[in-house]
């Protein structure tokens, strides 16, 4: 595997690397495995092939300006009742791969071989003729027990080898997660990294005028599907964050105009205030083991960072400084916490031991640095930077080296990591309407390379995204 | 008739808002006038011989939020990323303390706010600093801390909408609100 160290900071350098991007290939062979997914989605994976040495490959550590052409053929429906699900799965797989920026789905109108004949195997010359480097062929069958069986195969067109093959069993309602899992498998086989398509995003849906904004806790799939409002907008809510199991959210709510940290259970909708303090509690985030929430408490005009044990509900103070210490985020091994503090005079990023010891400043560039978030891989910390009236989303190594900016905007804020640590989501705000009296807030995603900046579709304006782990 | 009354009242509000920046000796005098008696309203009515003061009587209830906003000044503004109370802010807070002494049964919440040009968590903390700075000033001016609570809204509730320095300056504020 290629060293994940970031090698380029400027677009020109990245472009030069991208120009030299090589696609290597290797043979495939067959394996099988059996998996069980949650939520009634049982997946049997009698795999038809396992990859061997060289492979069809994208090195995602290098900016990818030349997406791999991939033929996502219509999943073959073995009966009329499977037709809808088959075409929906095809669409979601294709959209996931396209949105990653690493793949360019070939226009289906150009296909020379149909899905029915693909069941007997690809005519590789036909796929080379449409310049496809990779080929996905799938089928949907009724199992007779109310479940559907979804098979897919991934082929390397040039070497004429199958490099992945999996079958999933699920209820027909589970088709969307199957599609995301197919896309995750393709991503994994070709990049060598875990995918991130079978994930969700919790965020704040916004509506109404800028001075009376209505904000609702909301959740959706990473592609914007299955959007659900979790709160009704009565109380102002901010900064939701997932637990490691993705079944709980910690967030700030102004119930009764009293801003406090809450827990929201996604399964049963229950909301619970985390502790009762004389001042505001805010900026919560789970520990990697899910047993604690780290947060800020503001008391008598001073903000420090505390850790709450969720079993005993006891609070331990981690910082004790007259400055504003806030936005804490654990390292994935739970040993360190990064946070922001204005103890130097302006907001800067610090790293300390999980017990509060050895706070060390790591940001020394021009401007202010805020909202540090540790990557799930542990190698980088993402942040918001404010400099000369503009906002940046950037990353820096935990030792303070390797700082670079991914994007810049009038107002960009609050990065969150995809579980594979290769993609970030954040939000942007813009003035709008007459005399700039309106506000637009949208979610965006961007690759760690700084490429593939995309708006994430949401039913309403949106802010404060937090990406879930891969759904178990 | 109704419209006319409203526009007159609005004119008075406007005058009051303008004069709160300056010496506002006339307002201070009328403050004293209508608050000297137990039933301030009738006192005021008896004294009021001009139109605008009688319309204030109908519009601004003494001891109300509007009274605080119009006749005292319900908010202080802060510099960018600042939470120290300016000399102008101190004058307003001195008047607030005086007003709170006049209405000892009133308790208030200080709402701290920031402009939009910062990150969410920091702005919540900054709003808390501003609200606490105002609370501490009022306590130092003799108001019991038990009558004063604070809440920060960060950048969530701008008073002025717009992406310019004028709007941002109005939004960096702490507002005293009657509970």
Image: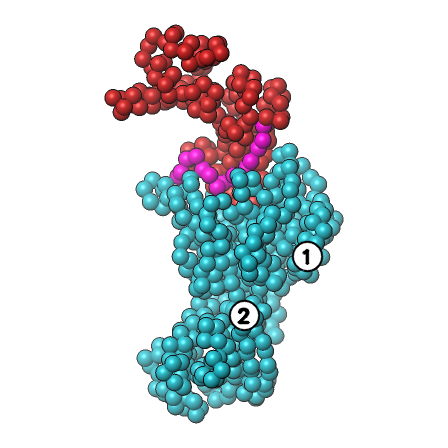
For image coordinates 54% across by 73% down, the residue present is A40
* Residue A84 on image: x %, y %: 38, 77
Palette colour of chain B: red
| Residue marked by disc 2 | A39
Q: Is residue A129 visible?
A: no
Work out whether mark 1 precedes mark 2 in sequence or the reverse, and give the earlier one.
2
- C-alpha separation, residue under disc 1 versus residue under disc 2: 23 Å
For image coordinates 59% across by 34% down, the residue present is B129
Q: In which quadrant will I find the C terminus of chain A?
A: bottom right
* Residue A375 on image: x %, y %: 60, 60
In this rendering, the label closer to the viewer, 1 or 2: 2
* Residue A195 on image: x %, y %: 54, 70
- Queried whether the magenta region covers residue B157, the answer comes back as yes
Labels 1 and 2 share a subunit: yes
Chain of the residue on which disc 1 is drawn? A
Chain of the residue on which disc 2 is drawn? A
Mark 1 falls on what kind of element? loop
- In the picture, the disc for residue A291 is 1
Q: Is residue A380 visible?
A: yes
Quadrant housing residue B22: top left
In the image, the segment drawn in magenta is: B148-162
Q: Residues within 10 Å of mark 2 (few under 14, many from 20)?
A: few
Residue A269, placed above or below residue B41: below
Quadrant housing residue A270: bottom right
Residue A321, placed above or below residue A167: above
For image coordinates 57% across by 51% down, the residue present is A271
For image coordinates 60% across by 40% down, the residue present is A280
Residue furthest left as drawn: B1
Q: What chain is the cyan one?
A: A
Mark 2 falls on what kind of element? loop
Q: In which quadrant will I find the N terminus of chain A?
A: bottom right
């Amino acid at each position: 595997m290629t060293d994940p160290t970031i090698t380029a900071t400027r677009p020109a350098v990245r472009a030069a690397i991208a120009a030299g991007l090589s696609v290597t290939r290797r043979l495939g062979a067959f394996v099988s495995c059996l998996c069980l997914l949650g939520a009634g989605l049982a997946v049997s994976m009698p795999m038809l092939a396992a990859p061997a040495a060289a492979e069809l490959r994208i090195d995602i550590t290098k900016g990818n300006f030349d997406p791999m052409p991939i033929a996502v053929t219509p999943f073959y429906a073995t009966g009329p009742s499977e037709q809808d699900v088959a075409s929906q799965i095809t669409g979601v797989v294709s959209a996931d791969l396209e949105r990653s920026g690493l793949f360019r789905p070939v226009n289906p109108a150009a296909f020379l071989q149909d899905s029915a004949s693909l069941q007997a195997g690809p005519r590789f010359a036909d796929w080379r003729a449409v310049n496809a480097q990779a080929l996905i062929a799938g089928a949907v069958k009724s199992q007779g027990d109310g479940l559907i069986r979804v098979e897919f195969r991934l082929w390397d067109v040039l070497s004429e080898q199958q490099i992945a093959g999996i079958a999933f069993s699920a209820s027909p309602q589970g088709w969307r997660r199957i599609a995301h899992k197919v896309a995750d498998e393709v991503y994994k086989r070709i990049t060598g990294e875990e995918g991130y398509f079978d994930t969700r995003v919790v965020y704040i849906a916004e509506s109404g005028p800028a001075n009376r904004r209505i904000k609702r806790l909301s959740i959706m799939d990473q592609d914007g599907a299955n959007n659900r409002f979790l709160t009704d907008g009565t109380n102002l809510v901010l900064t939701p964050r997932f637990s490691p199991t993705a079944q709980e959210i910690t967030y700030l709510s102004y119930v009764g105009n009293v801003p406090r940290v809450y827990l929201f259970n996604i399964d049963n909708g229950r909301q619970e205030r985390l502790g009762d303090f004389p001042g505001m509690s805010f900026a919560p985030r789970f520990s990697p083991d899910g047993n604690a929430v780290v947060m800020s408490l503001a008391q008598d005009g001073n903000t420090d960072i505390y850790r709450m044990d969720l079993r005993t509900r006891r609070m331990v103070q981690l910082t004790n400084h007259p400055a504003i210490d806030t936005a804490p985020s654990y390292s994935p091994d739970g040993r360190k916490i990064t946070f922001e503090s204005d103890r130097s005079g302006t907001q800067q990023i610090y790293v300390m031991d999980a017990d509060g010891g050895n706070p060390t400043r790591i940001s020394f560039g021009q401007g202010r640095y805020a909202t540090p978030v540790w990557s799930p891989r542990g190698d980088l910390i993402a942040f918001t930077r404010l400099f000369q009236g503009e906002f940046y989303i950037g990353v820096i190594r935990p030792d303070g080296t390797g700082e670079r900016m991914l994007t810049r905007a009038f107002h960009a804020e609050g990065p969150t990591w995809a579980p594979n640590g290769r993609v970030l989501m954040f939000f942007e705000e813009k003035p709008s309407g007459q005399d700039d009296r309106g506000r637009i807030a949208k979610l965006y995603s961007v690759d760690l390379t700084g490429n593939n900046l995309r708006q994430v579709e949401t039913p309403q304006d949106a802010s404060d995204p937090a990406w879930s782990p891969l759904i178990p | 008739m109704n419209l006319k009354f409203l526009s007159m009242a609005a004119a008075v509000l406007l005058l009051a808002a303008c004069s709160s920046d300056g010496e506002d000796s006339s307002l201070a005098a009328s403050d004293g006038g209508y608050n000297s008696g137990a039933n301030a309203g009738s006192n005021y009515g008896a004294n009021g011989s001009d139109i605008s003061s009688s319309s204030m009587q109908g519009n601004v209830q003494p001891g109300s939020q509007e009274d605080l906003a119009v006749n005292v000044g319900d908010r202080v503004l802060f510099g960018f990323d600042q939470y120290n109370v300016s000399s102008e802010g101190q004058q307003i807070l001195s008047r607030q303390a005086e007003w709170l002494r006049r209405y000892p049964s009133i308790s208030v919440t200080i709402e701290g706010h920031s402009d939009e040009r910062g990150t969410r968590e920091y702005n919540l903390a900054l709003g808390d600093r501003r609200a606490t700075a105002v609370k501490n000033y009022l306590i130092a001016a003799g108001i019991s801390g038990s009558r004063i609570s604070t809440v920060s809204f960060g950048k969530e509730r701008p008073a002025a909408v717009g992406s310019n320095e004028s709007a941002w300056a109005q939004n960096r504020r702490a507002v005293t609100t009657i509970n």
